[in-house]
Amino acid sequence: MSDSDADGPLRERVETWLAREMPIIQMHGGTSAVREADPETGEVIIELGGGCKGCSVSNVTTGNIEAELLKWPEIDEVTVRVPDARESLGGPDQAESIMGVDRTEGGRGDWGSSNPGKDHL
């Protein structure tokens, strides 16, 4: 008996499946949330967050989730969203300083502050 044949609301079955079949998400500090699971339309929307943001293999994880859930007879469409890591920082147009943290030169500031010069004791 597959997950799609089990009793219970579709959302709960998808959440249970994610926790059991995709432990790598939690193992790498990621999170998953079923945002929509509509048995009428067959649409499922999942959002990954936490460590998944900016992860170089998140596209592999999303592809695996989509491929497996599309095997369920009541699911016709799967969307897995992974927010861009820059979104939490305000995106590429964000000011160079966020709450006093300087983002220039890898957060080290400009040359004046990271290379004090010959007059520094």
Image: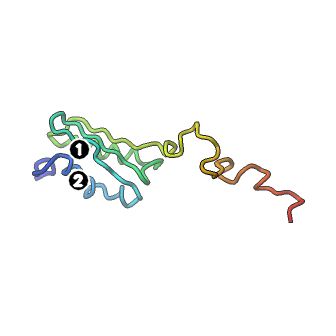
Density class for disc 2 (Cα within 10 Å; few <14, some 14-19, many ≥20) is: some
Please state if 15 lies on the left or on the right of 4 as rendered: right
Which residue corresponds to the image point at 60% horizontal and 50% vertical from the top-left?
99
Dot 2 falls on a residue whose secondary structure is helix
Q: Please identify the quarter of the rendering in which residue 78 is found.
A: top left
User: Which residue matches tag 1?
Assistant: 69
Please state if 2 lies on the left or on the right of 113 as rendered: left
On the image, the x and y values in percent for residue 100 come to 64, 51
At label 2, which amino acid type do we have? Trp
Dot 1 falls on a residue whose secondary structure is helix
User: Which residue matches tag 2?
Assistant: 17
At label 1, which amino acid type do we have? Leu
Density class for disc 1 (Cα within 10 Å; few <14, some 14-19, many ≥20) is: many
Q: Is 7 drawn above or below residue 91 in the view shown?
A: below
Please state if 31 lies on the left or on the right of 76 as rendered: right
Q: Nearer the viewer, residue 67 or 8?
A: 8
On the image, the x and y values in percent for residue 102 come to 66, 50
